[in-house]
Image (cartoon, helix red, strand yellow):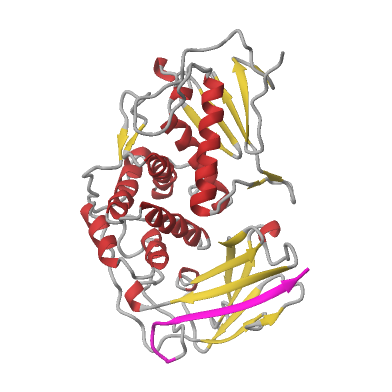
Amino acid sequence: MTVRLEGPGVVVLHNSETKSDDGLNNELTLPGSLRAGIENSLQWEASDEVNVFYHINRIEDWFLKTFEFAYEYAGEREGYNQAQIIAQCNCGPDINGIAGYGSLGFGSQSGRLWARGADVIYHEFGHNAVQPIFGNFIDPVGDPYCEAYAMDEGFADYFACALTNDPQQGEGVSTSPRSLDNTMVYTAGAYALEGYTGGLLISGACWDYRSKFADKTEADQIVFQALNIMSAWPEPYYFSDPSQSNFLSALRIADGGRHADWIDWAFGKHSLPFEEAAPVSPAPKVTSITPAKDQRAYGPTEIVIAFDRPIDELTFAGNIVVEREDYKGRRAITCDFFPDLTTRKKVTIKPRNASEGFAPLGTQTNFYVRLISGTAKAVKGKNGQKLDGDGDGQPGGDYKAKFWIID
């Protein structure tokens, strides 16, 4: 009999040194993959492969239920989408957990059996969930001492702990588990923290923000939406500098001004404050958008927004969000922004991935362009310039344009 651990969301392979196969060696039944903690765990003795299969399916279900997010990674080949995670166990003594590009792997580094930690499995899946949102990792270069790398690690921890509703990360396996319930503070100056250390700053601040909510799911959804918003803006991404924290700008947009004091408290607790820059007046306002507002479009490849006065190229991307709505739901799409460097009054927006662009999916696909600029939301670019969303000549207000495409 051949047992194969495979479903629509994941396939688990046994890896013995250099050998991989599509089945399980049933003679290698390992001790029960049970873990002390408050989250659900297997209640019978099972192999590491079964443990990984169970917990990946569990976090995939959680992402779908909580965020309406179904994992799908667009590969380098145009039109190729990988919806199934490929996971491997017993990857060797030099590996604890690794992830990315639709794969997960678990080894025995430091003599620990990392495939048996539910938190570890959730953390590694979190990398794979965030990656397609950004078209790569938040830090595509892999610099372990930059803020984007810290966000890669911090948000993988955050979503793992949000699922278990437990701020301890990896205590069932690691000899030095991380805690999101921490009092770490950032010392002003040039950022030079290693990724897992910096990750505790951003995850800790978000966890403190989450602690204020009676409905924790609402907090998780706001944090997840903030990542989607930030992904539509140009790299690099920051959280430590109060004058250029694009994550905090995105979080304030996602929060919608409803809990601004909670954000100030949570991030201030970790010395990650947000500075409100003085607005530039009069503020640039929208004069036209192509495709036309509230009209059917025919095969557009780009969106063009014109303003009545010059805008700063570091500002516009921090204020514009593009979303698509089809049978998969409504979600932000990753776009590149190209300012007209001659007049500085026009911005061209193009989807980064053709498969997630301005093409219909199903009978009708709606596209929303949101220019969000209220001073209460503290939305700004690096230079503090704000945009006029409602056309009254002053910073503030929302501008919303919708166009649609019929298949």
Determine whether 259 is above or below 152 in the image. below
Total number of numbered discs in the rendering: 0
Q: Report the side of 63 relative to 10 (left or right).
A: left
Q: What percent of the width, then of the height, locates residue 94? A: 48, 20
Residue 162, how many percent across, how many down?
39, 44
Question: Does residue 284 appear left or right of residue 9 in this picture?
Answer: left
- The quarter in which the N terminus is drawn is top right
In the image, what residue occupies the spot 32% across and 43% down? Answer: 200
Of residues 262 and 349, the one drawn nearer to the viewer in this rendering: 262
Q: Is residue 404 magenta?
A: yes
Q: For the view shown, which residue lies furthest in the front direction?
A: 43
Residue 273: image quadrant is: bottom left
> Which of these two is toward me, 404 or 64?
64
User: Which residue does the image show at 58% across and 25% down from the upper left?
Assistant: 88
Quarter of the figure with the C terminus: bottom right
Spot occupied by residue 61 in the image (x, y as percentages of width and height):
54, 43
